[in-house]
Amino acid sequence: QVQLVESGGGLVQPGGSLRLSCAASGDTLDNYAIGWFRQGPGKEREGVSCISRRGGPTYYVDSVKGRFTISRDNAKNTVYLQMNNLKPEDTAVYFCAVHFRFGCTLVAGSYPDWGQGTRVTVSS
C-alpha cells in the first residue's frame, strides 16, 4: 500500500506562490492517478487538480486554472502542485490522494489512499 506525505504549506500573502509536494513510499507513484484536494474552513472537500497515470491527461477545477500546475517527478516519486497568484479563497488544508487507475478524477470518493494534509493560509 502506498503511503503519502504532503509538505510545502504555509502562510503566504495574496498574490504569492507556494509549491506543495506529495511524496510517496511503498510503491511507484507513476502507477497511480493522483489528485490534489482541499478543504477550507466550513467547506466540503473539493477536487483541485489531478494527473493521470504515466503521462495521461491533467485536470483542474475552474477556480485554479491558469494559476495552479500539477506535475510529477518520477525520479523522486513525488507529485507537486505549483500554486501561483494565491487568493484568500485558496486557504485550506490540501491533501493528495491516489488511485490505481489510468485516468484521474476530481471526485474525492474515487480515491482510497490519502495523505494527512498540509495547511495553506493566504492572508495579508
Image (cartoon, rainbow, N blue to C red):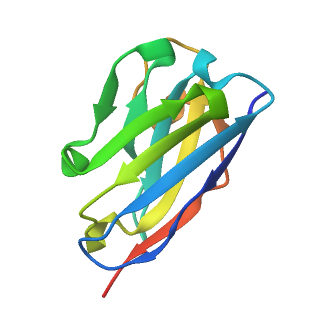
In the displayed structure, 99 sits above or below 37; it is: above
Tell me if residue 100 comes above or below residue 118 in the rendering.
Answer: above
Judging depth in this view, the residue of 22 and 112 nearest the camera is: 22
Q: Quadrant of residue 84?
A: bottom left
Question: Which corner quadrant holds the C terminus?
Answer: bottom left
Residue 90 shows in the view: yes
Rendering coords of residue 78 (x, y %) = 60, 37
Q: Position of residue 71 (x, y in %)?
A: 43, 34
Taking the spot 45% from the left edge, 55% from the top edge, the residue there is 19
Q: The N terminus appears in which quarter of the rendering?
A: top right
- At x 50%, y 13%, the residue is 54
- Residue closest to the far bottom: 124
Q: Give percent across and percent down for residue 23.
A: 66, 42
Task: Name the residue located 43 percent from the left edge and 15 percent from the top edge.
Answer: 55
Q: Is residue 53 left or right of residue 90?
A: right
Residue at image point 56% right, 49% down:
21
Q: Position of residue 11 (x, y in %)?
A: 45, 78
